[in-house]
Amino acid sequence: MTLDEMLASLFPDGHDVRNDHSVLLGSGPLRTGGRALVIGIADRAAVGADEAIRLSSYVLSSIENGSGPILVIVDSDSQRMSKRQELLGLNEYLAHVAKCLIYADMHGRPTIGILYGHSAAGAFLATALATRVLVGLPGADPVVMDLPSMAKVTKLSIEVLEEKAKSTAVFAPGLRNLAQTGAVHITWDEAVPLVDQLEALLGDMPDARDRRDALGKERSGRLKAADIAERVRGLALQAR
């Protein structure tokens, strides 16, 4: 599904979302009334400091001047890699995008990520995964860390990681594996109007507490994370 097709299916009555050098900014009407803010990255563009600060600014402005959910539509590369970006402190810019989305979600603006293309690494974490709920479209290609990079970090060979990926979703890229770990809440059906699926999701949004670890346990993609998180929480409460 192309970006234009997706936006037309989400907002059949029209929208004002514009693609400005691969940064998506705008809004669209909801069937139940009001408008959804739309931000995102298109054209498999890398996310650098310039893109990150524009997204952050748009979200913060909307908190002051608007209402309704925020859709984060993503087809990106990884974070932009260059000496300039490192000197600017790109990690802080990406963290700022994520914090703006979390802040908006905590203040009455439920955030929904819609992954329709590729995304990877820091750009994926700061946009799609920073939302309360992440939706995937068939054909989406998310990668938290590709296997060659994972091999460098873990000091395991790619062959070992490929073997582990067959049975352990956390080692494997792709939409199905991200859904199994709980990172992707639901995969929409392209044959059904997206506006219908969006309205259904808005009517049954999970609460703001991040329960992806529990979802990963239910789906047998992350068997330990929820229990460990709960144990850490319990110990922290005991120490208060």
Image (cartoon, rainbow, N blue to C red):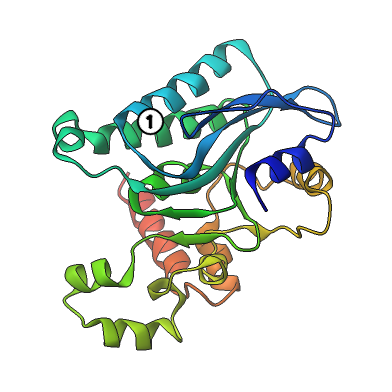
Q: How many marks?
A: 1
What's the amino acid at mark 1?
Answer: Ala
Closer to us: 154 or 16: 16
Circle 1 packing at 10 Å, graded few (<14), some (14-19), many (20+), is: many
Where is residue 49 shown, x and y percent of the image?
Answer: 30, 30
* Position of residue 232 in the picture relative to residue 105 (left or right): left
Give the x, y percent position of residue 50: 33, 27
Residue 129 % position (x, y): 48, 48
Which residue appears at 83% of the width and 49% of the height? 193
What residue is drawn where x is 23% and y is 45%?
81
Query: Residue drawn at (37%, 24%), measured in percent from left and top?
Result: 53
Residue of label 1: 52
Q: Residue at x 46, y 41 (%)?
A: 127
Location of the C terminus (image quadrant): top left
Q: x and y percent of residue 5 in the render?
A: 72, 45
The image shows residue 65, relative to residue 166, as above or below, that is above
Quarter occupied by residue 72: top right
Q: Quadrant of residue 158?
A: bottom left
